[in-house]
Amino acid sequence: MNPVTSGDVRGRGGLRGIIEGPAPPEAGDEPRLILRLVDGRRVVVPVSALEERGEGIYELALGPEDLTEAGSLVVPVVEEHLEVGKRRVETGRVRVSKIVGEREQIVDLPLLREEVEV
C-alpha cells in the first residue's frame, strides 16, 4: 500500500472522518494515521485497517465501538484558536472622466421688475 497522507474515511456504523496525517511512530509499531472524525474526536488507527476505494476514499475495517478495542488512542482537542479579522483588498479600479463645455446663448425675456443689492 502506498503511503496514505490524506483522504476521506468511511467505516462501519456510520463512522466518517478525514485523514489528518501520520501518527508519531512508536517502537515496533506498524505505521499509524491520525483520523479526525465528524464528531470532532481524533483517533489513531493502523494503516493496515484502511482499504483504498479510489478517488481519495478509504474504508475502515472498524466501527465506532472498535476504536479503543483496536488499540487506538483517542487524542482530545485541548485547545483550538481562531482569529477572525478583516482587511481592505483592492479588487478593481474605476476610471471616471468628465468633459466640461461652455455655450453662450442670448435669451430675450421681458423685464417686469428690476432689483439691485449692493
Image (cartoon, grey):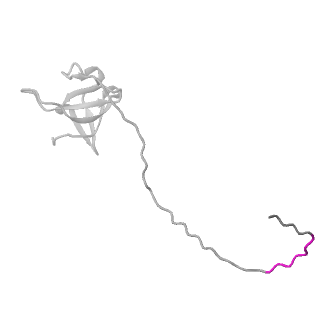
Above or below — where is 77 with respect to 114? above
Residue 60, x across and y down, in percent? 25, 31
Q: Give the range drawn in magenta.
A: 106-112
Residue 35, x across and y down, in percent? 26, 31
Q: Which residue lies furthest to the right in this view?
A: 112
- Residue 61 lies left or right of residue 94; in this view the side is left
- Residue 2 lies left or right of residue 107; in this view the side is left
Q: Is the magenta stretch mostly helix, strand or loop?
A: loop
Q: Which residue is drawn at 29% across and 45% down?
A: 55
Residue 68, x across and y down, in percent? 23, 19
Q: Residue at x 31, y 32 (%)?
A: 17
> Which residue occupies the foreground of this view, 118 or 51?
118
Residue 16: name its quadrant: top left
Above or below — where is 28 with respect to 87? above
Q: Is residue 110 magenta?
A: yes
- Residue 111 lies left or right of residue 91; in this view the side is right
Q: Residue at x 84, y 67 (%)?
A: 116
Q: Is residue 87 magenta?
A: no
